[in-house]
Image: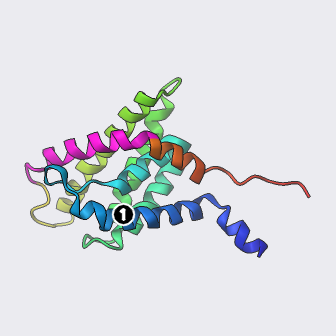
Amino acid sequence: MTRLIALVERPMFRLFLVGLVALGFQTTVLNDLRPFGVILQIMLVLAASSGLARGSEVGAVAGFLVGFMYDLVLTTPLGLGATVFAIAGYLAGLANTFVHEPTWWSRMLLGGVASAVGTVLMPLALAMVGIEGALTSRVVVIVAVVAVTNAVLCVPFERLCRWILKDPEVVPV
């Protein structure tokens, strides 16, 4: 029983569990809810918010984990989304280190920019591996909608990621 409790207290395991819920929400509700014909990317905001909450290294690892989970349900090459989400999480955490005292609006801005970068990198990466039709002029609309919605969602998700990725407390015996 103590091993199970120790497992659940690990930050990446908590991120995996929350990522499963977000993945279910992404593939069901958000697949049908398409503002301006764009599928909102809640998995990308989870990766960017992880970087904002805990820094660039944790953001990269969390982005890779979340992106890999998302890759398992997509028809893209395995690992491509994981790499893009890792870059987005890393960039969000890296940019946040340059802000002296982050406010809610600076976190929104950084989360939106990291989401925009991730949204631009995905069709570029798909074009690099030879998938036709991913890089079109429609990417501009997709980037704008995803960046704005993820910027709005970034503040509550960043608080959620602070809880998810907090270090386990060590209780003296």
The answer to whether any part of residue 42 appears in the image is yes
Whether residue 56 sits left or right of residue 112 in the image: it is right
Q: Which range is magenta?
A: 136-155
> At 9% across and 53% down in the image, what residue appears?
136
Res 6 → quadrant: bottom right
> At 45% across and 30% down in the image, what residue appears?
104
Q: Main secondary structure of the magenta part?
A: helix
Q: Residue 56, image x and y in percent?
A: 50, 44
Query: Looking at this rendering, what residue extends furthest in the bottom direction?
Result: 1
The answer to whether any part of residue 55 appears in the image is no
Q: Residue 50, image x and y in percent?
A: 49, 48
Query: Looking at this rendering, what residue extends furthest in the right direction?
Result: 173
Which residue was labeled with disc 1? 25
> At 38% across and 40% down in the image, what residue appears?
111
The image shows residue 79, relative to residue 58, as above or below, that is below
Which quadrant of the rendered structure holds the N terminus?
A: bottom right
Q: Residue 159, image x and y in percent?
A: 52, 43
Residue type, label 1: Phe
